Amino acid sequence: MSIRIGILAIGNELTSGRVQDSNSAFISRLVQMQGWQVPSIVAVGDSEEAIRKGLEFLLPACDAITVTGGLGPTADDLTTEMIAKIFNLPLYTEESALNYIRQRFEELRLEWTPNNAKQALFPQGARTIFNPIGTAWGFALSVSGKLIAVMPGVPSEAERMLTERVIPLLREHFGISETVMSRTIKLFGLPEAKIDYALADAPLDRPGLQIGFYPRFPEIQVVLTARGTAEPEVKKTLAAASAIVEDKLRKYIFGYDNETLEGNVARLLTEKGLILSVAESCTGGLITDRLTNVPGSSNFLNRGIVAYSNECKIDTLGVPLEIIEKHGAVSEETAVLMASGVRKLGNADLGLATTGIAGPTGGSDLKPVGTVYIAIADRSGSFCRHFNFRWDRRRIKEISSQWALELLRRHVEENGN
Amino acid sequence: MSIRIGILAIGNELTSGRVQDSNSAFISRLVQMQGWQVPSIVAVGDSEEAIRKGLEFLLPACDAITVTGGLGPTADDLTTEMIAKIFNLPLYTEESALNYIRQRFEELRLEWTPNNAKQALFPQGARTIFNPIGTAWGFALSVSGKLIAVMPGVPSEAERMLTERVIPLLREHFGISETVMSRTIKLFGLPEAKIDYALADAPLDRPGLQIGFYPRFPEIQVVLTARGTAEPEVKKTLAAASAIVEDKLRKYIFGYDNETLEGNVARLLTEKGLILSVAESCTGGLITDRLTNVPGSSNFLNRGIVAYSNECKIDTLGVPLEIIEKHGAVSEETAVLMASGVRKLGNADLGLATTGIAGPTGGSDLKPVGTVYIAIADRSGSFCRHFNFRWDRRRIKEISSQWALELLRRHVEENGN
């Protein structure tokens, strides 16, 4: 039977709806990748009774429990104290933690107040878990053979501590020596059902290999997880499985693991020394917003023009008035001229343009809401692709920006310019 | 003692981390607004045992339970069947639901398959809950005096059904005749601690009135909830409380309830018939992206220029090279000339510009990462504001776009142009 990990999230901000609990989904996904399972996730407020009941509910059905939240220095951070009380353990001050916290305060020139010493208190017998980015260290406690791993609630801290410290601790606790490795393959342009279908006959059903699908609109992530005793063998299994997915779906893969589409477009353009200019109508600036999320984007991005008026399409991008009058602002002709016009503006290597009807109004029988044209121009010519999306305004913008970046990625990969 | 509502979320996609549970936070917030409380939130997979255990855990500590998820037509949608089994109730077909689902299929020209009839099955004694946007109706069941309200897991459906049907059902169940009304006041530009401090002496501590703070970076939402027997009196309490908050914090309030900052800027500009042009450097298109999320934004937005190169600032916006060489691309002088330049481009009434260092590199001692200048130009002049933000790249973009829109909102409100 599979190892069962219970998840307990502590904090009044969760049960009042003040903050959304994102840690539990992150923990579940990591647990799933280990081949373990999560029977339940419980969120409770900052009270002894609630924490006790949550633990009592999870302990019988689980082999280990992760706890997040309530490790801060303020009066309503009760987790350590409550857990010590529940298991009848005295608290002690861990000097190394106290020194570390004091040192952090000095470095950041923060005023020391006595309540901060609370963060160096741990239940007797606990093993501390170092926090590489904050002052709230976690701890692990073994109770009747079950491990309880406690982390702070701040998502960035919990995620790092979980990945780097808690998963290894759990593996040690369960005596797991097998290697687990995973690879996320990011796809766009094919619905989940078709990805599933494309892989139905693929020889991915082998021992030690697990495959999961995670939709993250507008992308689909395929997560491959391989397990085995020897690392080289696990690496080989993972590489083989990855090759099978690539073989079936190469065209739709835009990145791996922590890569983003805009990040990979940025990398490609930078590597090839290409300069890009963008003209956006229906996407309204979302394409350049995404590209400028990538550090160093000023190396390849010359300019973006959000041409929300016909006037701007005409006077800045040089689309002739007659073209707009004859074919419409939302047309292949206009899209192509926007792309070539913006490319010339900055003497860029590439011009990318979008024009469409994001709705909710503005559609017609011939060009309904969701009609979008995306064009790319380079020094030798241009092309345009036409789409009919069936989403709301925001999602039409999102999927249009995704297609624009994806078409650009494919174009640069295939043509080198 | 306050009414206690337990939350049970059902679905393997939750315990595997495939999807994040956003319903539970939404339900918690609505429950909190009623003056009730949530002792715990539990998420379990699609199995009878897990659902049973979740209910057994919640029932003793709660007066009612909301259940979301697992009401679809597929084989792993087990919620209705499992709940019927747990409480020993036979299932029956609700003809009105079946007819409704069949009709929806005809309207959408979808092929009918027999498994869809499953969505018209309900446990004997249940009261159906109409789903105004989908085919998965919910139901409410009274078990030993406790109400169990079951809804689909799709967030848009659960949110509407909860607000329109489940909260009224729960009120009826608890025999609550008092009126509850709430108002969300949205603030920006003051940290939560300072908002708290500003309201510390305000006479908001009165019976039937509740105040909550919800940070939603970069905004803070203050939620006022008033309760009482007569609606006019509750309205009066809410209006009085709202006036107190407005009196203390007027300058920082940009909207109410479902309003957004970009939506209110769009409304103001449209009402006053003003045309806007935007020049963005460090925000990279995020300002126009936000403005174009508002339907009808083409009525006031003339253009956006994402001036990511000095060349674009010079040739398109008309910032003199000497200014950039003397003061830098990130300077008050450049910001002001970007704003007046872009305003003139489209002969717009207003020009809005941002220039700054979003990082992680590019900072200096004099102008560290987070240095941002935001300028506004109108037909009579211009002004600029200087900021030093301490966030990461994305948050610097977000807070800069927020300040830019907020300064524009205040300017248009105060000056009418």
Image (spheres, coloured by chain):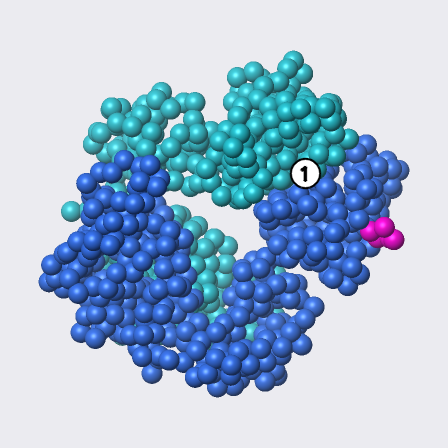
Chain colours: A cyan, B blue
The picture quadrant where one finds residue B315 is top right
Q: Main secondary structure of the magenta part?
A: strand
**Is B269 located above or below residue B87 in the figure?**
above
Position of A357 compared to B61: left or right? right
Q: Closer to the camera, B108 or A55?
A: B108
Position of B222 compared to B109: left or right? right
Three-letter residue code for mark 1: Tyr
The answer to whether any part of residue A23 appears in the image is no
Asked if the magenta segment contains residue A317, the reply would be no
Report the label total: 1
| x then y, percent, for residue A263 | 55, 34
The answer to whether any part of residue B133 appears in the image is yes
Q: For the point 59% across and 47% down, which residue is it? A: B295
Q: For the point 80% across and 61% down, which residue is it? A: B415
Residue that badge 1 annotates: A308
**Is B161 located above or below residue A265 in the figure?**
below
Q: Which residues are magenta?
A: B378-382
Q: For the point 19% across and 70% down, which residue is it? A: B143
